[in-house]
Image (tube, coloured by chain):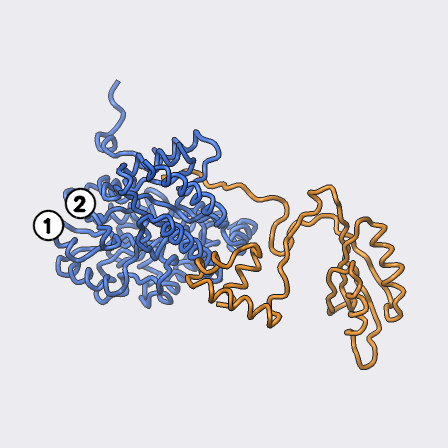
Chain colours: A orange, B blue
Amino acid sequence: MREEILSLLEKNSKIDIKEIAIMLGTDEEAVFNEITAMENEGIICGYHTLIDWDKISDEKVTALIEVRVTPQRGQGFDFIAERIYNYPEVNSVYLISGGYDLLVTIQGKTLKDVSAFVSDKLSTLEAVLSTATHFILKRYKDHGTIMTGKPKDQREVIS
Amino acid sequence: MRDPLSKKIIQVKPSGIRKFFDLVSEMEEVISLGVGEPDFDTPWHIRDEGIYSLERGKTFYTSNSGLKELKIEISKYIKRKQGVEYNPKEEIMVTVGGSEAIDIALRAMIDSGDEVLIPQPSYVSYEPCAYLAGAKPVIIDLKAENEFKLTAGEIIEKCTDKTKILILPFPNNPTGSIMERGELEEIAEVIKEKDLYVLSDEIYSELTYKGRHVSITSIEGMKERTVLINGFSKSYAMTGWRLGYACATKKILDQMLKIHQYAIMCAPTTSQYAAIEALRNGDKDVEEMRCSYNYRRRYLLNAFKEMQIECFEPYGAFYVFPCIKEFNMTSEEFATRFLKEEKVATVPGTAFGAGGEGFLRISYAYSLDTLKAAMSRMNKFITKLRSR
């Protein structure tokens, strides 16, 4: 049942417990208990809403920053990752295989905001060797959802 | 001027679904629960194979019975699902949708005056196809108290010495009813005893929600009496590709192939390449779609329960078939008023035969949000009806 609940929640965090219970053919209490347990176990880490900020006047800029770092003795990448993810403007930090080490995504109000963060905060960290910042120009698909509008039902009437 | 038309074709009534939906097309903001095809797009990897085949210039006719590779995949698929072996060389043919297979199977097996048993409510094409093939269609009215399953008794009751073919439309459109192994075994006895053939339309075979679909061909002694019809439309959301297939003994298939050869030549080549990919790598897609349909099915059944609308639990296809007899209206009246007053399109049960009177076909090939909006309108509608 866990995986079914998770896949429903992953697609729609707004879904209520009663609805999950109906769809899975079980009772509400069982669903509630399962969800609570998964929250406690850290399987469910939060409930997000997918927003297209471009559609409201309050625009936001998102950047992906490739960061090359020197891992610290005894702590590997964890220590430097923590230094970076503690900044509230940082959205996500991933350790990456390949040409660089950490992929950091950050959201700011303007290009300037983001640039300032990179030059003042990120680049000045001792372990950081270099950064490369990529600004997102358009989101076509995010979290499995196509952002360019819902397609119309194209089915025609047939016998 | 002479009448250009045949007297035979004039007798055929246009489809009841069609008639109803001409009304829908004139209205705005209608929520439709009327469509009988998946709301999913064909999975991308399948479309991609179709495109790739075009890129490689695979634009010629295939052999009349279809691509060898595809027939082999179909054979493997049936073996895997039903444990029945069909020889891809002579017992399988690829058709333009399941609907072509229905037509040519009847034409290949019917002589004028033969009787064809057609359980109803069921898909709209059996009766006209049987009639056009020269048969006398004999209707078996399936009963709500049997959850619209076919029973051995009902076959015996309608059987005469002219009866030749039984059409077996399960999982059923429009009722969503399925036939389980035990039930099939019972009717198989009668079929053998009365020396009948079966045209088993299993187009919804992948969409069952209570165990796996059982084909009548998997029952002892039934393979040689059955034309098994299936296709890609419902299981892989490939309606527009127009691809189905028929499996039968060489004796029957050779004759079906003759009609196909002269009338159709071969099924669309691009679709055949895409279908190979569907059978090879499409299991996961089918599973995901089935899972979504099942959520919606449960959602609708619960909504009916809350509205206290009588509806048996259907375990197949993507339809529910609620009973609206308590409102003292015909299905057509109910559906028409529901459409005009609340702008929700459903299909009157009578579009699938007189036995559908008192019922509505509601399709759940729609997103949950659409179903929710429709159910809230339905609640409003029936509250209004009940308050008078």
Q: Which residue is mark 1?
A: B160
Picture coordinates of residue B38 (x, y %)?
44, 49
In front here: B251 or B326?
B326
Q: Nearer the viewer, residue A112 or B76?
A: A112
A79 displayed left or right of B50: right
Looking at numbered disc 1 in the image, what kind of residue is underneath it? Thr
Label 2 Cα crowd, 10 Å radius (few <14 / some 14-19 / many 20+): some
Circles 1 and 2 in contact, beta carbons < 8 Å: yes
Disc 2: which chain?
Answer: B
Q: CA distance from mark 1 to mark 2?
A: 10 Å
Q: Secondary structure at mark 1?
A: loop
Instruction: Specify the subunit that label 1 lies on.
Output: B
Decide which of tag 1 and tag 2 comes sooner along the chain: 2
The quadrant holding residue B338 is top left
Outermost residue toward the bottom? A74
Q: Amino acid at mark 2?
A: Val
Tell me if residue B240 comes above or below residue B216 in the rendering: above
Q: Which quarter of the image is occupied by the C terminus of chain B?
A: top left
Please tell me whether residue B61 is drawn above or below residue B72 in the rendered image: above
Exactly how many numbered labels are in the figure?
2
Identify the residue under disc 2. Answer: B138
Residue lying at the far top of the rendered structure? B1
In the displayed structure, A84 sits above or below B231; it is: below
Q: Residue at x 13, y 54 (%)?
A: B156
For residue A134, say whether it is visible. yes
